[in-house]
Image (cartoon, rainbow, N blue to C red):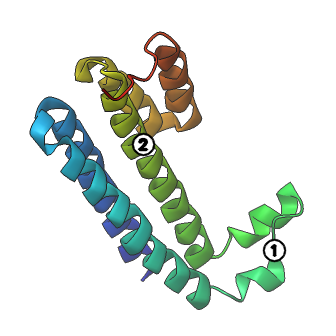
Amino acid sequence: MAETFFNLGNLLAMAGWLTLVAGLVVRPFRPRSVGLVRLTAAFVFGAAYIGLLIVGREAFGEGGFSSLIAVRALFANDFALTAGWLHYLAFDLFVGAWIVEDSARRGLNGWLIVPCLGLTFLFGPAGLLLYAVLSLFAPEKKAA
């Protein structure tokens, strides 16, 4: 069952990233793409995450978050490991949605954002860092 959630989570995350890129390319779709991805990250990944933690709750007796050894023991349980993976997928996807939304407010060209999304997808904080640096050169536009 954990493997099924792992595979479905990967497919859903990939669909989310493609939706964000589509929002960059098709500007009228951008607000909907961001909203759709946010809802998916919060509700679908959140519900699956909670369910996996409940099913794998015995892992918390064996491990925890207080040390690297405890985290390793926690993630020896497939349900806790899959929950951790979904946690990673959901938060990176949520950050990607924020990047797309913020870049629109700053008037940044969508093609400049694609590398930021790619890095966020593959290496989370590295993509966020790239976007943070890029955004320094494009202050937020003021509403008229």
Q: Check the image and name the residue furthest to the front.
A: 144
| Residue pointed to by mark 2 | 98
- For label 2, the crowd category at 10 Å Cα-Cα, with few meaning under 14, some 14 to 19 and many 20 or more, is some
- For label 1, the crowd category at 10 Å Cα-Cα, with few meaning under 14, some 14 to 19 and many 20 or more, is some
Residue 22 appears left or right of 92: left
Three-letter code for the amino acid on which mark 2 is drawn: Trp
- Name the residue: 72% across, 81% down: 59
In this view, 86 is above or below 100: below
User: In the image shown, does 37 or 135 lie closer to the viewer?
Assistant: 135
Q: Is the residue under label 1 in contact with that under label 2 (CB below 8 Å)?
A: no
In this view, 114 is above or below 87: above
Please tell me whether mark 2 sits on a helix, a strand or a loop: helix
- Name the residue: 42% across, 42% down: 98
Q: How far from the left and from the top, in percent, is residue 43?
A: 39, 73
Q: How far from the left and from the top, in percent, is residue 61?
A: 82, 85
Q: How far from the left and from the top, in percent, is residue 137?
A: 47, 9
- Mark number displayed over residue 63: 1
Q: How far from the left and from the top, in percent, is residue 7?
A: 34, 66
In this view, 136 is above or below 129: above
Three-letter code for the amino acid on which mark 1 is drawn: Gly
Q: CA distance from mark 2 to mark 1?
A: 33 Å
Does label 2 or label 1 sit earlier along the sequence? 1
Q: Check the image and name the residue furthest to the right.
A: 66
Quadrant, the C terminus: top left
Mark 2 vs mark 1: give the one in front: 2
Please tell me whether mark 1 sits on a helix, a strand or a loop: loop
User: In the image shown, does 23 or 127 lie closer to the viewer?
Assistant: 23
Q: Check the image and name the residue furthest to the top.
A: 137
